[in-house]
Image (cartoon, rainbow, N blue to C red):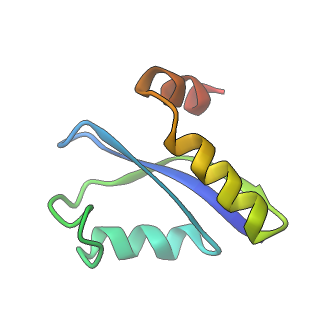
Amino acid sequence: MYFVYVLYSAQLDVYYKGFSTDVAKRLDYHLDGIHKYTSSVRDWQIVYTASFATKSEALLEEKRIKRLNRASIEKLIKG
C-alpha cells in the first residue's frame, strides 16, 4: 500500500506534499530534521492522507497535488 500525504507547519504556515509506504514513519523523518526542506521546524502535522494500491498511482496523485494552489489544497484537506 502506498500513501500520498500532506503535512502542515503552523510556524511556517506552509504545506508539504509527499508519498510513502509508512506515513507515521515518514512524519518522524520530517520531525527529526533529516529532510532538508522540513528540517527548519519541528511542528509538522499530518493533515491529509490517501491510499493507493500501486506506487505509480500514488506518484501520479502526488504530482497532481503538488500542482494545486493553496486554496485547492485546503479544500482537499477539508474533504
Observer-nearest of 10 and 17 = 17
7 relative to 24 in the view: left or right: left
Q: Quadrant of residue 8?
A: top left
Q: Residue at x 65, y 74 (%)?
A: 21
Q: Residue at x 19, y 42 (%)?
A: 12
Q: Is residue 24 above or below residue 50?
A: below
Q: How many marks?
A: 0
Quarter of the figure with the C terminus:
top right
Observer-nearest of 41 and 71 = 71
62 relative to 8 in the view: left or right: right
Task: Give the residue at the far right of this rendering.
Answer: 53
Q: Residue at x 39, y 51 (%)?
A: 45
Q: Is residue 70 above or below residue 45?
A: above
List x then y, in percent, for residue 62: 60, 52
Q: Residue at x 47, y 72 (%)?
A: 26
List x then y, in percent, for residue 11: 18, 42
78 relative to 58 in the view: left or right: left
Q: Is residue 14 above or below residue 5?
A: above
Observer-nearest of 16 and 67 = 67
List x then y, in percent, for residue 52: 79, 60
Quarter of the figure with the N terminus:
bottom right
List x then y, in percent, for residue 42: 22, 61
Q: Is residue 49 above or below residue 18?
A: above
